[in-house]
Image (cartoon, rainbow, N blue to C red):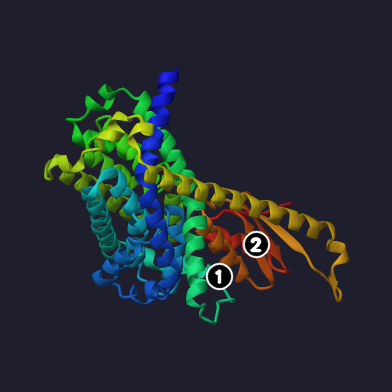
Amino acid sequence: MLQYIEKYWDALIMMLAEMAPYLLLGFFFAGLLRAFVPKSIYRKHLAPRNMKSVVKAALLGIPLPLCSCGVIPTSVGLRREGASHGACTSFLIATPQTGVDSIAATYSLMGLPFAIVRPIAALFTSMFGGWLVNKFAHEDETLSEEATKETAECSCDQQTSPSFWNNFISAMRYAFVEMLQDVGKWLVVGLLIAALITVAVPNEWLAALHDYKLLNMLIVLAVAIPMYVCATGSIPIAVSLMAKGLTPGAALVLLMAGPAVNSASMLVVGKVFGCRTLRLYLTAIITGAVVFGLCIDYLLPQQWFKVSGMIMSGGHCAHCLGTMDWVWMTIFLLLLVNAFVDRLRHSWMLRREKSKEERGEQNIKEGDTVSDITIYDVKEMACNHCKANVEKIISGIAGVESVEVDLVKGIAYVHGQHDHSEVERQVTANGYPTTLKV
C-alpha cells in the first residue's frame, strides 16, 4: 500500500512540476488580454452573415480563457449586439477548447506539436460549425434573436477609462485570483484523476486497444461529451491515458470534446440558439475532433506526440526536480490556496452582511419605503464569468438598486422593489435556472 501511495504522490508532483511555470505564464497573459483588449472588438467584426465573420469569431475566441459555461452568456451577449448566428456558433466552439493558459499548459506536458495542433484543430472545427449554421440553420436565426432580447442590458457601464496601473491590478486579480478560482478546482480534480490512472490502471488495458484507433476515439467521445472538464483540467488526464496506451489522436479528441461540450451547455445552446443549431454544433465538434485525431494517428510522425519519460515512469521527484521546480510549484500552490480562501471569505462576509441587514430591516427606512432584500436560488453557476453575467442581467431590471451574488452558495441578494418573476425569467433564459427563495 505504501508503495502505491508513494507512486501516486510522485506522479502527482511530477505533473504539477511540469505544468506550474507554464500555467502561471498562461494566467498572466490571460489577465492582460482581459484587461487591455477592448470588449468592443469582439462585437463590431462579427455582424456580417458570411465566412469572414465566422473566421474572426474563431480567431477571437481561441485565446480567451472561457469555459463552456462562461462562453454561453458571452455568446448570447455577442448575438444581442448584432453578431451573426454562425459567428456566435464559431465563438461557442472555439473558445472553451483553448485559451492562452491551456495552450501553455499543453506545451508543458504534451510538447510543442500538441500545443500547435490543438488551437489549429479548434480553429477549423469552429469555422466548420459556423459555416454549417449559416447554411443550414436559417430558421434558428429568429429564435436566437428573440431569446437574446430577453437578456438585460446593464445600465451602469463605466464612462471613464481606468489608468494603466488600475488595469494592470485588475489583470493580475483576474489572472491569479478569479481564474484560479474558476480553473483551480477542475485542475486539481484532473491532476488527482490523472495520478490515479497512472498508478491504478494496468498498461495492458489501453495498450490492447492501441491498434483500434477509431474505437479509441469513439470511447473517449462517449465519456467526454456528457461530463464537464475544462480545457486546462483535461490535459493531465489526457497525458496519463496516453502513458497507458491511449493513442495521441484519441487524446486530442478528449482535449477538444471534453471542454467544448457537456450536458448543461447542450441544454442551454438548444434553448437559446435552437435545436438545429445544437445538432450542427455537436456535429462540428465531433467531426472535427475525430478528423484531426485520425490525422495525428495516421499522417503525423508518432514520435512528435510521445509522453515525457519522467511522467510515464513517475520517477522519484525529490531526486529529479530542481530548486526552481519547487519554487514554481510553491508559488502556484500558494496562489491556488489564496484564491480558494478568497472565495470562501467573500461568501462568508456576504452572508454575514445580508443576515445583519435582514435582521435589522424593519429599522432601515427611507421615507415610507422599507429597504428590502430579495433572495434567489441561482443554479448552474460554475465560475466568475457566470457570477458577473447574473449580476449584470439582474442589475438591468427595473427597480433593482443593487445585486450581489454568492457563487459558493448559488444565491443572489437583490436590493430594491422589483418584479420577482422578471428576475426569474431573464436569468433563467440565459441558462441559469432561478427561483425565488422562500
Observer-nearest residue: 42 or 277? 42
Considering the numbered disc 1 on the image, is that residue within a helix, a strand or a loop?
loop
| Pointer 2 or 1: first along the chain | 1
Which dot marks residue 165? none
Query: Is residue 299 placed above or below 148 in the rendered structure?
Result: above
| Position in image of residue 168 (x %, y %) | 47, 69
Considering the numbered disc 2 on the image, is that residue within a helix, a strand or a loop?
strand
Q: CA distance from mark 2 to mark 1?
A: 16 Å
* Residue at left offset 29%, top offset 62%: 130
* Residue at left offset 40%, top offset 58%: 65
Q: How many marks?
A: 2
- Badge 1 crowding class, 10 Å Cα cut-off, few under 14, some 14 to 19, many 20 or more, is many
Task: Name the residue at the bottom extreme.
Answer: 159
What amino acid does circle 1 point to? Ala
**Do labels 2 and 1 touch, CB within 8 Å?**
no
What amino acid does circle 2 point to? Glu
In the drawing, does residue 214 fall left or right of residue 223? left
| Position in image of residue 422 (x %, y %) | 63, 65
Observer-nearest residue: 93 or 315? 315
Residue at image mark 2: 404
Q: In the image, which is nearer the foreground, mark 2 or mark 1?
A: 2
Q: Is residue 129 visible?
A: yes
Residue at image mark 1: 152
Query: Is residue 50 placed above or below 12 in the rendered structure?
Result: below
In the drawing, does residue 223 fall left or right of residue 146? left
The quadrant of the rendering that contains the N terminus is top left
